[in-house]
């Protein structure tokens, strides 16, 4: 429901955040409102800017690895992957095959965990508290699996240039298969019957926050936001890396461009990730988990770019080296920054409750925007 | 108009379905752990803060003061020093301080150690009112552990 | 009953206040336990056996905290609003017949009386939000007013339907009229074929009572993900506590009203041993359903909420009223 264009006579400014229940972290949105209608929404960033790109220039290549996970803490392994990928490409390291499979399996598990958490937080934004606990029940299984392998539960530092830190064992494989069965059983009931089909939810998010494909292109949106607007783009398929070309999976695309479409893209992606994990587990080869990598990485002077698909979209790393032991410059292209940038344009004229539902559907992780 | 009736009937049905799901969950067992009374089992690879590994026989730290961990640490939270061993061969550790306030538990130090001298502790609930409680003296900690041993 | 009217009044006054206070305290406990079970957690379990002393601890905590009166608020109204908010629910309880002889005050238009005071509850929310001088609070109270206005209409229309059947607006007489088993209840009334349409009236009334008491999925006034805590944002200590208590007392009143209007009041479904325990059973079953609903659905939207009222509830209750009038007239 959008406000007809007219002259706004009496407006007031409402500060949402940096401490507000719906902004998930420290995003601040300055909204000019006319009653419950939003006349202008202005996101204010920088409250959790920690200079990660600058930190990358301070230490050697390996020392930046733990910081990557702190940016997108919900899909930390994808950030690990992105940085490893650019490092591997730049230094010309051939990652061992088993390590590639382990990377994909853990990244996809992490992607499911991220989508589950998004789903939970989104429902919380919409006022449904119970789904959060159901999603956390499933997410907890993933965290347990990853903790047994990587040693930590959220901000993993698991990948290394040329491979991964620890090998996975048979217990991990069998437990992951059990988890896949469990989630496949629970998805139709606890997620779709309880929530997706719910009339209140449908009325809340269907037709709300419509982003056109043209807007997505203009702002450089990617990930589920772009795929919800009919843009068939996924780095895993279209700029393939790792072993994704060998796996059979689909990229869910919806044309509507509303919050419901983004919701459905993510729900479908959970199923596709389950498929990917299953195939990767079937094909998992034996062998070493680390390639022969020099102790101190010292790539030749030059530049290299690598992109990975995180749960929020295309994450790019551009690495500039001058032949030293530390990166000369590391630039991140983070998906949520672009996804948030179209917020102001779309939110104009919406009602405040719809704006927050729309904001939730963008799946923002603030440290990744600010870096 | 047909949308109006469909919304009412399909909507009412979806609401009943939702109630039946939560109603069923109501009678199912609790899945949470009652934390202070039940503690989770830590996996073998759990990353706590680091601690020194003692030599099986002598009880002295395995550390040879090579300083690799100090150099590997991305946040510079390790400070160690050593002196020449009395036997004249190698060096012995005199102090090993971990500034846990800046540690990000990445494990680079443990990974870099070639002498089996560092490991992750199993401690996960260290709390204090004072920042100084997180300046850990790992040699003192090792001595304590040695005393606790039978 | 009791000879001395002053003793009579005092006994009922103390009784009702205890009833309201205990209900407000322990419904919070029930709600937390119920929510926990639905979400497969344990809920409160530390203070007392199964957390039964938790409401006491919460109450003590709230009372010992400071009531912050921020700069820029209307201090008098700010303090008055939560106290006033308690009033409508307490007054309404006075005219509710819990049993054939268990009623503080029997008056002719008791049903209307409750509705009149229910509107006051909305006024208190408005007052609290206005006095706070907080933007979130003002949006919230504006929402609460439009919501209450929209849902009072279908509720009153349903009440008229009941009045047509029972021929009275006295709650006691409405309940007495339904004695004699399940099929005398207004919800399942065989006599005059009212069973055909009354279930619609019941659903409308139940939904409206949820909306009137600002409960999820219609808790737009305190939508925490949008408006932080709505009209309660600036309240701390017992100011907040009183608003919360008022909310739970209003739920009790809503459930009592539904029980009397549709479920035969204190009557037993098998027409044996009627009494206040039947009343309690039905009332708490309704309250449990309200809790169950809250922990199942997401929150709706303010314009969807108003649409539901004006486009669905009001037409349906009007049609229902017409049909009932026809049935009463021609059968």
Image (cartoon, rainbow, N blue to C red):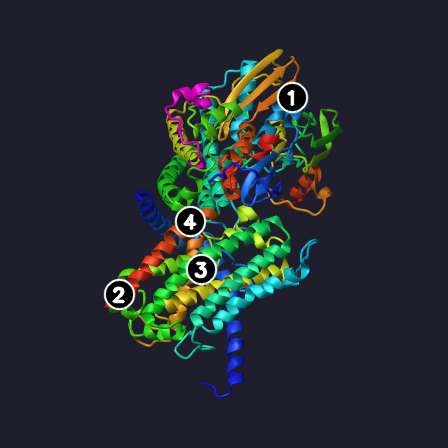
Q: Quadrant of residue A250?
A: top left
Ranked by sequence position, the earlier of labels 2 and 4 is 4
Query: Relative to the observer, which residue lies in front, B76 or B10?
Result: B10
Letter of the chain that mark 1 sits on in the rendering:
A
- Estimate the spatial distance between the alpha carbons at disc 1 and disc 3, rounded to whole Å: 69 Å
> What residue is disc 2 on?
C327
- Estimate the spatial distance between the alpha carbons at disc 3 and disc 2, rounded to whole Å: 24 Å
Letter of the chain that mark 2 sits on in the rendering:
C
Identify the residue at image location x=50%, y=61%: C29
Letter of the chain that mark 4 sits on in the rendering:
C
Q: Residues within 10 Å of mark 2 (few under 14, many from 20)?
A: some
Q: Of tags 1 and 3, which is closer to the observer? A: 3
> What residue is disc 1 on?
A60
- Estimate the spatial distance between the alpha carbons at disc 1 and disc 2, rounded to whole Å: 86 Å
Ranked by sequence position, the earlier of labels 3 and 2 is 3
Magenta residues, as a range? A233-260
Query: Relative to the observer, which residue lies in front, B83 or B40?
Result: B40
* Up-down relation of residue C39 to residue C286 (above or below): above
- Estimate the spatial distance between the alpha carbons at disc 2 and disc 4, rounded to whole Å: 29 Å
* Up-down relation of residue A318 to residue A37 (above or below): above
Q: Residues within 10 Å of mark 3 (few under 14, many from 20)?
A: many
Q: Of tags 1 and 4, which is closer to the observer? A: 4
Ranked by sequence position, the earlier of labels 3 and 4 is 3
> What residue is disc 3 on?
C152
Q: Are marks 3 and 2 in contact (CB under 8 Å)?
A: no
- Secondary structure under tag 2 reads helix
Q: Are marks 1 and 4 in contact (CB under 8 Å)?
A: no
- Secondary structure under tag 3 reads helix
């Amino acid at each position: 429901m959008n406000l007809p264009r007219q002259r706004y006579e009496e407006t007031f400014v409402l500060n949402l955040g940096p401490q507000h229940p719906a902004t998930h972290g420290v995003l601040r949105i300055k909204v000019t409102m006319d009653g419950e209608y939003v006349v202008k929404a202005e996101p204010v960033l920088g409250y959790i800017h920690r200079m990660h790109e600058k930190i990358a220039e301070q230490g050697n290549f390996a020392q930046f690895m733990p910081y990557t996970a702190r940016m997108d803490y919900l899909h930390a392994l994808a950030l690990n992957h992105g940085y490893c990928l650019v490092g591997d490409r730049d230094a010309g390291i051939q990652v061992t095959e088993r390590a590639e499979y382990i990377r994909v399996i853990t990244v996809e598990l992490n992607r499911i965990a991220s989508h589950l958490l998004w789903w939970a937080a989104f429902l919380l934004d919409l006022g449904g508290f119970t789904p959060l606990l159901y999603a956390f029940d499933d997410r907890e299984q993933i965290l347990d699996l990853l903790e047994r392998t990587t040693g930590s539960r959220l901000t993993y530092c698991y990948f290394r240039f040329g491979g991964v830190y620890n090998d996975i064992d048979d217990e991990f494989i069998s437990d992951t298969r059990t988890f896949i069965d469990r989630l496949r059983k629970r998805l139709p009931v606890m997620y779709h019957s309880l929530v997706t089909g719910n009339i209140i939810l449908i009325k809340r998010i269907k037709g709300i926050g419509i982003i056109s494909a043209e807007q997505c292109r203009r702002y450089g949106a990617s990930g589920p936001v772009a795929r919800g607007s009919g843009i068939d783009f996924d780095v895993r398929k279209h700029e393939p890396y790792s072993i994704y070309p060998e796996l059979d999976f689909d990229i869910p695309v919806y044309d509507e461009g509303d919050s419901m479409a983004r919701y459905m893209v993510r729900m479908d992606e959970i199923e596709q990730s389950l498929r990917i994990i299953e195939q990767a587990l079937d094909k998992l080869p034996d062998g070493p988990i680390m390639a022969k990598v020099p102790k101190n990485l010292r790539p030749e002077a030059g530049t290299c770019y690598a992109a990975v698909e995180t749960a929020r979209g295309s994450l790019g790393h551009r690495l500039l080296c001058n032949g030293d032991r530390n990166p000369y410059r590391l630039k991140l292209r983070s998906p949520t920054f672009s996804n948030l940038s179209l917020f102001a344009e779309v939110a104009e004229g919406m009602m405040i409750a719809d704006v927050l539902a729309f904001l939730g559907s963008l799946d923002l992780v603030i440290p990744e925007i600010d870096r | 108009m047909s949308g109006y009736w469909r919304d009412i009937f399909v909507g009412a049905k979806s609401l009943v379905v939702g109630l039946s799901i939560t109603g069923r969950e109501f009678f199912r067992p609790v899945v949470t752990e009652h934390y202070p009374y039940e503690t989770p089992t830590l996996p073998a690879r759990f990353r706590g803060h680091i601690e020194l590994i003692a030599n099986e026989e002598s009880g002295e730290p395995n550390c040879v003061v090579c300083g690799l961990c100090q150099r590997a640490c991305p946040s510079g939270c390790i400070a160690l020093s050593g002196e020449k061993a009395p036997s004249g061969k190698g060096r012995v550790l005199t102090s090993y301080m971990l500034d846990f306030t800046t540690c990000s538990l990445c494990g680079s130090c443990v990974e870099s150690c070639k002498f089996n001298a560092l490991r992750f502790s199993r401690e996960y609930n260290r709390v204090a009112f004072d920042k100084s409680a997180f300046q850990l003296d790992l040699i003192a900690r090792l001595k304590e552990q040695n005393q606790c041993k039978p | 009953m009791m000879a001395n009217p002053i003793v009579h009044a005092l006994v009922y006054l103390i009784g009702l206040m205890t009833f309201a206070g205990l209900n407000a305290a322990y419904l919070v406990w029930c709600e937390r336990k119920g929510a926990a079970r639905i979400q497969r957690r344990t809920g409160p379990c530390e203070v007392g056996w199964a957390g039964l002393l938790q409401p006491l601890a919460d109450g003590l905590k709230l009372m010992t905290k400071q009531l912050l009166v921020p700069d820029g608020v209307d201090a008098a109204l700010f303090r008055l609003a939560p106290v006033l908010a308690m009033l409508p629910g307490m007054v309404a309880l006075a005219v509710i017949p819990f049993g054939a002889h268990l009623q503080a005050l029997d008056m002719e238009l008791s049903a209307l009386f409750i509705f009149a005071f229910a509107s006051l509850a909305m006024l208190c929310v408005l007052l609290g939000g206005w006095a706070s001088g907080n933007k979130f609070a003002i949006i919230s109270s504006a929402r609460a007013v439009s919501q209450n206005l929209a849902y009072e209409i279908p509720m009153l229309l349903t009440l008229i339907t009941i009045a047509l059947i029972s021929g009275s607006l006295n709650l006691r007489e409405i309940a007495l009229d339904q004695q004699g088993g399940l099929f005398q209840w207004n919800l399942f009334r065989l006599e005059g074929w009212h069973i055909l349409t009354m279930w619609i009236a019941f659903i409308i009334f139940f939904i409206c009572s949820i909306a009137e008491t600002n409960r999820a999925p219609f808790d737009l006034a305190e939508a925490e993900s949008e408006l932080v805590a709505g009209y309660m944002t600036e309240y701390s200590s017992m100011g907040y506590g009183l608003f919360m208590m008022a909310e739970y007392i209003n739920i009790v009143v809503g459930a009592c009203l539904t029980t009397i209007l549709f479920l035969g009041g204190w009557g037993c479904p098998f027409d044996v041993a009627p009494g206040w325990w039947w009343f309690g059973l039905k009332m708490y079953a309704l309250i449990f359903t309200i809790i169950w609903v809250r922990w199942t659905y997401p929150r709706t939207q303010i314009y969807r909420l108003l649409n539901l009222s004006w486009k669905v509830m009001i037409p349906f209750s009007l049609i229902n009223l017409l049909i009932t009038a026809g049935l009463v007239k021609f059968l």
